[in-house]
Amino acid sequence: MKRKIFVASILALASAGMSVTAFGQDADPVLEAYAAAYDLTYEEARDRLILMDSGTLAELHDQLKRDPSFAGMRIVHKPTLKLIIYAKGNAVRLATKASVSIPVEAVDVPRSLSELQAAAGSVTRSLQAAGARFEIDIEPGTGTIIVYTEDDAAAKNVLGEDTSRKLPFLKLVKSAKRAEPTATFIGGQRVSGSRECTSGFTVYRTSNPSQRGVVTAGHCGTTSVRVNNVLFNQPVSRMYSGDYDQMWFTASGHTWTNTIYTGQSIPATISIQATYDPIVGALLCKYGRASGQTCGEITSTNAGVTNPDNGTVGYYYRVRNLTPNQPMTINGDSGGPVFGTSGVAFGIVHGRGSGQFVNDMYFMPAHRFSAIGASVLTTP
């Protein structure tokens, strides 16, 4: 009912000759998806998103993760909005450092994030050495590591009884399929290389801001690509291994802007104004030339997946679609922009989920662009 009132209000304004954007940020895709998914009015969704300021939460995360007891943070949206801070030991001590507008809950957990990451690294190396294909996830709230594999018995055999004794918090889950890159060979508005993909954000060379270009997923090609029928012969830099799936191209004689397509009619584009690292529970949308705009909620910032082309394991952010029983991304969306409310760049699409993760998307955070000498353009 609240969603119907929200849409009716917009239509009423439009019929009265007022633009939708005059109503505030009604056409913000993240706001609209949030209101619909959680049965909120426009005002409720808007006010909550203001409280969940990406910059403030990113700064808090950077501050708290320096503490050896820190285990993680996540936003919970129902039954009430709150921020949970996990820590090994006295979580209340860390929670007192949180100067945020959202109610904060402190939760003690059995293991710190650094302990979980070290254990996950050991498991990853063992499975990689045996040639196993798997995904691995860290869940700070329960202090567990979950390995998703097509052959759980074989994975258990590789890890052995000794690992099971040392890591009683390790869980093996049989999975139908693993995450797959979202490239395909179909037509449409696209990045056309050895695979079909989507362009991400406009970026600039960090050492020379006047040199601008476009970033997309590294698995979309190895040499030349066409973006909107413009041929780029060679990437400035490309990384497609482990935590990285990215490349960027540049050429002179073009006009570069800090805008992206949203996949909706109003606004058709938005300006990118900042980049932040989101936390678990944050809301976002992505645009891909194959599936258009979809919006979701981050469920993990430590989702380890196997690269299907070279067998390396990397950690990406996983997102669940806010629309039940619908995939967050499909083949052809790789490299597309992942963004938050108010024009915040979060990253680019890496892959899609399947099996129990059929609704999920994996994306690479934008801060990793620094490894290829690039930064997101946030000014015209």
Image: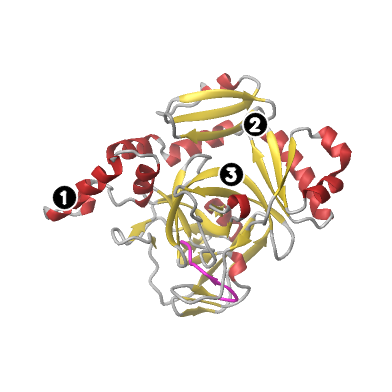
Tell me which corner region of the image, top left, top right, bottom left or bottom right, holds residue 238. Answer: bottom right
Callout 3 secondary element: strand
Residue at x 79% of width, y 34% of height: 167
Predominant SS of the magenta segment: loop
Residue 148 visible in the displayed image:
yes
Q: Which residue is mark 1?
A: 12
Q: Is residue 29 left or right of residue 12?
A: right
Label 2 Cα neighbours within 10 Å, binned few <14 / some 14-19 / many ≥20: some
Residue type, mark 2 in image:
Thr
Quadrant location, the C terminus: bottom left
Q: Give x and y (percent) for residue 89.
A: 65, 21
Is residue 126 something one can see in this rendering? no
Task: Please tell me how crowded label 3 is: few (under 14), some (14-19), or many (20+) other residues with Cα within 10 Å.
Answer: many
Give yes or no for contact between labels 1 and 2 (Cβ–Cβ under 8 Å).
Answer: no
In terms of sequence position, does the residue under pointer 2 or pointer 3 come before the other? 2
Residue type highlighted by circle 3: Thr
User: Which circle, 1 or 3, is nearer the viewer?
Assistant: 1
Q: Amino acid at mark 1?
A: Ala
Residue in the picture at 73% in, 57% down: 312
Q: Mark 3 or mark 1, which is nearer the start of the sequence?
A: 1
* Marking on residue 301: 3
- Residue range highlighted in magenta: 193-201
Q: Which residue is mark 2?
A: 142
Q: Is residue 297 above or below residue 113?
A: below
- Element assignment for label 2: loop
